[in-house]
Amino acid sequence: MTASIKVGLLGLGVVGGGTWKVLQNNAEEIARRAGRRIEITAVAVRDVEKARKLLGDSPIRVTTDGLEIARDPQIDVVVELIGGETLAREWVMEAIRQGKHVVTANKALLARHGNEIFDAASDNDVMVAFEAAVAGGIPIIKAIREGLTANRIEWIAGIINGTTNFILSEMRSRGLPFNTVLAEAQRLGYAEADPTFDIEGVDAAHKLTLLASLAFGIPVQFDKACIEGIAKLEAEDIQHAARLGYRIKLLGITRRRDDGIELRVHPTLIPMNCLLANVEGAMNAVLVYGDIVGPTLYYGQGAGEMPTASAVVADLVDVARLDSADPEHRVPHLAFQPDAVKDIPILEADDIESSYYLRLRVEDRPGVLSDISRILAEAGISIGSMFQEPGEPGEASIIFLLHLAREGSVSVAIEKMSKLPFVRSEVTRLRVEELI
Amino acid sequence: MTASIKVGLLGLGVVGGGTWKVLQNNAEEIARRAGRRIEITAVAVRDVEKARKLLGDSPIRVTTDGLEIARDPQIDVVVELIGGETLAREWVMEAIRQGKHVVTANKALLARHGNEIFDAASDNDVMVAFEAAVAGGIPIIKAIREGLTANRIEWIAGIINGTTNFILSEMRSRGLPFNTVLAEAQRLGYAEADPTFDIEGVDAAHKLTLLASLAFGIPVQFDKACIEGIAKLEAEDIQHAARLGYRIKLLGITRRRDDGIELRVHPTLIPMNCLLANVEGAMNAVLVYGDIVGPTLYYGQGAGEMPTASAVVADLVDVARLDSADPEHRVPHLAFQPDAVKDIPILEADDIESSYYLRLRVEDRPGVLSDISRILAEAGISIGSMFQEPGEPGEASIIFLLHLAREGSVSVAIEKMSKLPFVRSEVTRLRVEELI
């Protein structure tokens, strides 16, 4: 058997600890596959004492300085699991400059600084593997980057944040409001103490940014993503959606259009009978539509100690297998050869095309519906279905499902509706996607 | 860009024609990914005239002799899409001996002669890629072989035959008997004129044999699979299953046990709310359970011109990428290094462990249930639930759901029940799996 591959681990928290355990527990199975052993030889952590306890009597070097690991000539691969964008970026860049391969689960780092990192990796003939950065244990990056290479990928729609999917599943199945479920999710460990990144859709947008680059061969450009979270979603809308045959999921959607690429994260009504609508709890799933293969779907646990460690270790096996290969013929970081990456524009929010769900509370008097319908008609937006139901005394709620429209036109129409004297609420707008 | 990779195509039928089209239509997208062009330079077909018509004025050489292609020094990769086990085997083996990589969609060939073929490939330092052989366009082989390498895979359960899934979906949703739906499936092109391989479960067992080898690192051994098809399935059992909260799917199941490996294809009751139960029509889906990642599921079209071509071309891109790599460090054919493949025994049918559904028609008189229950009790089999309903005058149907049991014990119990004087039918036995 070839010599073992030496790994330096940055971070020994949840995922780092999991990675260490997997490499210990499944060492034999992994070596049978990889053809060589994968061995952690050094770890950088904040708390050396604590790390020593976890590592027991294994002869792993423990340091607080990641640069020491990035510069250690004995180390072949650096695994970055500390998160954040400061130290992580510095240590990863140094490891690359030192000619080491990098495995990382850090989606924020790659979504914001991926172009710089992948360029440096190409210049230094090293691999940067990041299967763990998107949808945890689901090998979705491998599927897109290697499994669907025959396809012109048309679009991707994914449930890629477990926290928000857990919250939405609970809101729907138990009829509870957002804040109640969030508190419970925090108690159960499904949501962090500061859940902003998850519930505002930022985490999902980080992951979607990477998926879009892999699907379309474009640079990573997180700053152009349109992002809307679930914090303002009302239980009432979940019920109306159900009545119309839909469920609401926080989806990351990226779609190729003639004039550019849509890159957007938002709560979305999807038909109840499609598989994505039935992905419940903290599970993740990604639906990919290729022109040749049609739809394929990938489902599994998207976060947590072990699922994420599964992806980290799979990347290590890939690196072990390809370490000796001609760098030119490795799988390119962003699925397409670096010189084939194209800077196709990401579309502005106003240019998104979607169907829409609108809900507004109005004074219950004659002429209301006709005034609202006229605004939609003038904007060239056609109505798929509509229902009205009584609300507080003298009030009614009106719900529209609109056909495909440009988001800019819908925004203008909403603006006009809000100014009608009999409209008594903000206009709730959600996007609707029929998917497949 | 590196020189193009030259492909010789054996067969230009449905999948061969699709492969040709994909390589034409998506040539640019594919080259952007692979870093080199993939070019078909020769084709072996039965009908040269017909091939010429399809290929138009492209300068592709057309021959009727596959050996000519296998021996052409200009060709880098031979793609075998003629099916069958005679010519296909001869041409594939010759291509390997000539040092060419092989891509094939031929599950029967690999399930029966895979060990010989993979050995020859290792001896000649070439790759044999077969993503198209299992679940068509779904990159399931890549997922297992490369995406889940951190895991000790515990079991796989898959809907891996579209024809039977289409038939079962129609039988359930429209309440029609097997023969009616089969005739319709044949009319619609979902079932072949001779549907034996599909409906008897042989095709699914070919695919399952390959999945088991990839999951557990064992030689392919199709002859040891336990196979039961759907031809004898009655509409009545689909209804009873529904009442109990289950759907019936033809599953391929392979599971690692302490004493060996289960390898079995049969109609299976699975809980209605699990994702696999909601895979309808001709779609395929494979559920893989790894000790680290937990369950992951892969879904898509399992057959047909384009989905299968998608997998063939993805394999060609892999080959193009890895052509120049050190043979020792390519991904091993059966996921595990050749010297790490273990000959773990495949269990006999009697040693399978499952839960069971039994249905029998009995004379409606006192003591019947007690006699039957006694037989089960004596065999050490416990009853999960049971219901009885009236049938023809003087008769009743009894349905049991049994807890986990050894199949041998269940068979003995069924044998005894059949001999009871008041039992008026064969005992219908179906397996039940709770999955996840």
Image (spheres, coloured by chain):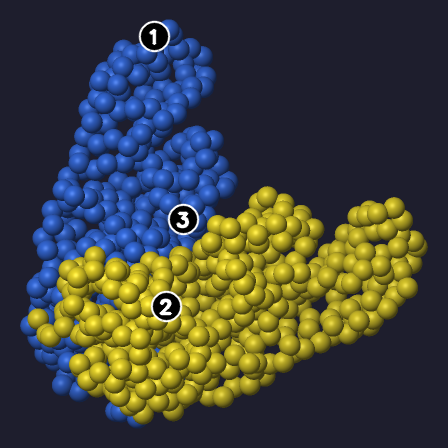
Chain colours: A blue, B yellow
The residue at the point 10 percent across, 78 percent down is: A98
Q: Which residue is mark 1?
A: A367
Judge if badges 2 and 3 mark residues of a common chain: no
Q: Which residue is mark 3?
A: A276
Q: Chain of mark 2?
A: B
Q: Residues within 10 Å of mark 1 (few under 14, many from 20)?
A: few
Verify CB contact (< 8 Å) between mark 1 and mark 3. Answer: no
Q: Residue furthest right?
A: B366
Give residue A59's position: percent from left, percent from top: 29, 88
Q: Identify which amino acid the numbered label 2 is placed on.
A: Ala
Residue B149 found in image quarter: bottom left
- Residues A112 and B37: in front is B37
Residue B223 found in image quarter: bottom right
Give residue B58's position: percent from left, percent from top: 17, 64
Q: Which mark is residue B132?
A: 2
Give the Cα distance between marks 2 and 1. 60 Å
Mark closer to the observer (2, 1): 2
Q: Residue furthest front?
A: B49
Q: Identify which amino acid the numbered label 3 is placed on.
A: Leu
